[in-house]
Amino acid sequence: MSDSSQAKKARTSSFIEAIEEDRKNAGESVLDFKFNKKRIRILTELDEVAKNCRGVVYWMFRDSRVQDNWALLYTQKIALKNKVPLHVCFCILPKFLDATIRHYKFLLKGLEEVERELKSLNINFTLLHGEPNSALLEFVKNYKMGAVVTDFFPLKLPMFWVNDLKKNLPKNVPLCQVDAHNIVPCWVTSDKQEYSARTIRNKINSKLDEFLTPYPPVINHPHTSEQNLEKTDWKTTLKVLKVDRTVDEVTWAKPGYKGGILELESFLKDRLDLYNTKRNDPTVDALSNLSPWFHFGMISVQRCILEAKKFKKKHKESIEAFMEEAIIRSELADNFCFYNEHYDSIKGAYQWAIDTLDAHRKDKREYIYSLDQFEKSLTHDDLWNAAQNQLVEYGKMHGFLRMYWAKKILEWTESPEDALKWAIYLNDRYSMDGCDPNGYVGCMWSICGIHDQGWKERDIFGKIRYMNYKGCQRKFAVSEFVKKWGGKVHTHGKTEKK
């Protein structure tokens, strides 16, 4: 190992150790820790753990980590109070939306780390297979679980699973939901869909003092299960998945909590000074790059903010900008998906946007491309092609370019419905943070004007905010980005609409 590698490893180890020390200092016992009950939604009529049960279970789904996890902490608090074993279940689906083997490999490697850490804490981990509403129900009945706690994911399919499980659980088994993803729980921030960042910002910021608090540690669990639980066969699990295997894993992002903390440390110590001024420049390495770990819940946004605030005296503007993106914009996305069932459809747009897109749907398009041409980067625009190449190869597209990328799909597609559908598909298929509220809102903002206002009317876009190539050239060195990501002009792939 080189001297620089040894130094980096030592630096990272000390960073993780400091976080663990802070966590331990936050509370001596999970049982004694005063849990903010606003984080919890009791979804069933009863809230008492079933009598004579043989454990309680945390159904982990969106937040696949052990520490800094309010849902797991609450489940352990219940288990300790009732003096029963603690179980964690994760339900693996053979297919989830447009996720590929790229996403599943990242997820499963992270879950292996979760299993090892839980085992070291005398907490049981079981990987279930199939639809969670059925697999979890069977687990609860077979192993006599006395309560179920799950995390919060505002997409339609996970919400259906939770509601279906609620209907079918034994009447004496309560179901609770804890928002372990957002700092301020989604249902606490607002009871309605917010119009924009402007309307939600103060509702979140006014509650940060209450919710942006240190985490107590998940501790070694004193109650051991005597039941024979299924052991996880990770290799077989990977083989039986029914997902696209042509989009393979990325190498730059190391899965799991430790990988996420490594990226957090790198951001805070190596890139934070550039974040405020250069985060919209795709040619500069100034972003946090934390979105894969945020999406899979391998690290907590709240932990990252707690650590970032330690740098506020030196990098005030960058920390404030990071908090705006990681808290306000992210929690706004959850708000939109939670309160708008059409978060992935033109129907979910504001009426002014629906009207303006409809009024311009027959406008002449200079270029029209098929989904296949988009996917293979076969447009006339070298910048767009380079951005698509970055998405396919790297599993992540620079945030500024994702807006340009989606808006051009609207401009070069026969209908706004196709544009939105294809943008979501490509994002969910290739991006490490695909199938996420942030992705849906990013596409809806770019194509349907969500969380935005009407702008000067123009062809195709109507009053939807417009972006063009020249505007990008004014902001950053387009040719440099194109060269890095192999963007080429393709004239043979276009068709003109007369």
Image (tube, rainbow, N blue to C red):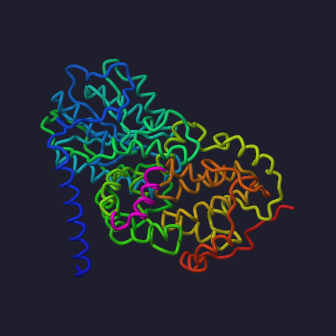
Please name the residue shown 66% across and 61% down the image.
372
Residue with the most extreme right position: 498
| Magenta-highlighted residues | 313-328
Asked if residue 96 shows in the view, the reply is no
**253 w.r.t. 157: above or below:** below
Task: Measuring from the top left, give residue 480's x and y in whole percent.
Answer: 56, 80
- Decide: is 331 above or below 284: above
Please name whichever residue, 297 or 255, is drawn nearer the observer in this view of the structure.
297
- Residue 338: x and y in percent read 51, 38
Quarter of the view holding residue 28: top left
Q: Is residue 99 above or below residue 29?
A: below
Residue 483 at x, y percent in the picture: 57, 80
Return the x and y of residue 132 as percentages of the image width and height. 40, 36
Image quarter in which the C terminus is found: bottom right
In the rendered structure, the answer to whether residue 347 lies left or right of residue 364 reads left
Does residue 183 appear anywhere in the picture?
A: yes
- 464 left or right, relative to 28: right
Residue 381 is one of the magenta-drawn residues = no
**Residue sitting at x 29%, y 52%:** 112
Give the residue furthest to the left.
222
Question: What residue sits 51% from the left and 47% below the top?
Answer: 437
**Split into 4 quadrants, where in the image is the N terminus?**
bottom left
The verdict on residue 325 being magenta is yes
Residue 267 position by quadrant:
bottom left
Tell me which secondary structure the magenta stretch mostly adopts. helix
In this view, the residue in front, 131 or 286, is 286
> 373 left or right of 57?
right
Badge count: 0
